[in-house]
Amino acid sequence: MAVTIVKERWTNKVGEVILGTEPNVVKIGGESTLPFLHFEGEMPNRPAIALEVWDMEPTNWPEILTSAYAGVLNDPVAWAKKCVEYGADLVCLSLVSAHPDNKNSTPEECAQLAKAVADAVNVPLIILGCGVEEKDAQVLEKVAEVLAGRNFLLGCATQENYKTITAACIVHGHNIIASTPLDINLEKQLNILITEMNLPANRIVIDPSVGALGYGIEYAYSIMERTRIGALTGDKMMAMPVICLLGQEVWKTKEAKSATEEAPEWGEQERRAILWELITAVAFAQAGGSLFVMRHPESLKQFRAHIDKLMQSNAY
Amino acid sequence: MILIGERINGMFKDIREAILNKDPEPIRYWARRQYENCAAYLDINTGPTVDPKDQPAVMEWLVKIAQETVPLPCCIDSTNPEAIEAGLAVHKGKAMINSTTADQWKMDIYFPMAKKYNAAIIGLAMNEKGVPKSAADRVALAMEIVVNADAHGIPMEDLYIDPLMLPCNVAQDHGPEVLEAIRQVKTLADPPPRTTLGLSNASQRCTNRHLINRTFLIMCMAAGLDSAIADLEDQELLDAVAAANILLNKDIYCDSFLKTFRQR
């Protein structure tokens, strides 16, 4: 007796977002199936990976991380070039110096630096503010203007500051990261608010505010899973690719920061920290993430090898 | 909830006159209006006053005008197989046949037709003896329909069982039976057939028709109803369906859920 193989048939797919301008374009999204189930649909774009660059030298990164970027940590342009050497598909520039507690850099200063970095590499940029909503609105507005037409990805827009950032993306031709704090209903609502301002849905990337392994990874996983299923079953306001800002989360943890001597039963720090970042990324790839921002180049390398295998077709 | 707009039916005066005078405007008007009111299909019925020999041509005319006006499939509604086939022949995309009963001679006409035109088809849980009273009897007729559909290679997702609601002012004991029948139809096959309902029957010649229709639709959604042929003019009906989708965990909640329900 013949067995009927049961396959899901979805009615909709995740929107495809194009970042950057030809010839240096990265496409994310477009999935018409659950993650890596090539036998039930298409994954036209493999997950893309960015490495993080700060616009000022980090003071509390562990040595096992800073050693990978020796000599470039106080030169964002050189640092960005190093990231591309390490195989990053994009560079994620974090304008940390704009934070009032750091240098409180002006929007103009941030924008000039962003331009220098953008002109130095041939990959698209993700540009993040400092996390203070009001400041980020001003900073990203200026960045958008100075980098007009480059079609980069600007973030993070929240329910408080999305209007300014959305307007800047519309006027100057960029894409937006819509960020909500692990709340799927707010996530959907923010996408609605942004599209109501007439930014097309295919210029929105969802940031669910992922947590690292051991620090609430399950919440983000379940939200991303529900988001993907919503997209595939026809919910247009959930049909956007997801970005995982996991580097910043992983490298805050004691599992990444504790020296080998401090926690001998945890094993050697470098291997442990890289594994922590890698497993966090792998879990989110399984949950449907399309864009990953990481810190350690070795994590990127191993994650990329993992994705290579997962992107091999299992269609039958 | 797949909503099927009921309005393009010759039993309504304006449609009847439009057919008589070959005036496409009322057809276009109702096609557009129902499209805006979340219709996924337009039910197309020539009505009882068109002569059987004219029904095929009228059906063709109605289907063409509807599909020229809005990008929706039609639910081709007639007791005349020639009229149904005429509608299917000019239909673009996947139509729905409304309907067959559990009578063998009807199923022998309509299931091959559904297969030929790759159409979905509504199966009424009744036969020449009429509409049964109990849920069990309705489901027994539904089973016959399921078996026949399957034998003709109609996929279960293209089969819509209608357990047939009767007006609550004269057949008040049917409501609970219909709800139970909707639940049980899902157990008839795996994957299961779909269900539909001619909603307006529930309130024929009653007062507060919209209220009765809307309330029964939500009850049926809780029992698992997949689609309904309804009067989509009632905005509160559309709002209630949007709310029901949230409560049944079918759509993800957001504060603008009423607005997103209406967006295409």
Image (cartoon, coloured by chain):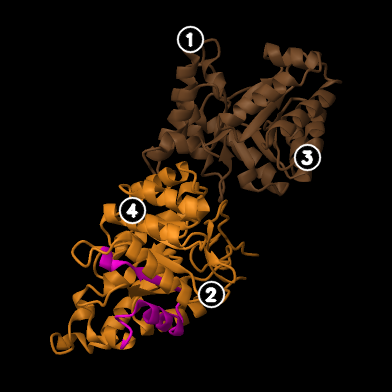
- Do the residues at pointers 3 and 4 share their chain? no
Task: For marks 1 and 3, give the CA distance.
Answer: 39 Å
Asked if residue A297 lies in the magenta stretch, the reply is no
Question: Disc 2 marks which residue?
Answer: A311
The quadrant where residue B246 appears: top left
User: The residue under label 4 is which amino acid type?
Assistant: Ala
Q: Is residue A239 visible?
A: no
- Do the residues at pointers 1 and 2 share their chain? no
Asked if the residue under mark 2 is in contact with the one under mark 4, i.e. CB atoms within 8 Å, the reply is no
- Image coordinates for residue A297, horizontal then vertical, percent: 37, 83
Q: Give the letter of the orange chain.
A: A
The quadrant where residue A279 appears: bottom left
- Image coordinates for residue B120, horizontal then vertical, percent: 68, 40
The quarter of the rendered structure image containing the N terminus of chain A is: bottom right
Question: Disc 3 marks which residue?
Answer: B113
**Magenta residue span:** A70-98
- Do the residues at pointers 1 and 4 share their chain? no
Please determine whether, in this image, residue B158 is positioned above or below residue A123.
Answer: above
> Is tag 1's residue or tag 3's residue first in the polypeptide sequence?
3
Task: For marks 1 and 4, give the CA distance.
Answer: 56 Å
The quarter of the rendered structure image containing the C terminus of chain A is: bottom right
Task: For marks 3 and 4, give the CA distance.
Answer: 61 Å
Disc 2, SS: loop
Task: For marks 2 and 3, give the CA distance.
Answer: 43 Å
Question: Disc 4 marks which residue?
Answer: A137
Question: Disc 1 marks which residue?
Answer: B207
Q: Which of the pair B12/A252 is nearer the observer? A: A252
Asked if the residue under mark 3 is in contact with the one under mark 1, i.e. CB atoms within 8 Å, the reply is no
User: The residue under label 3 is which amino acid type?
Assistant: Met
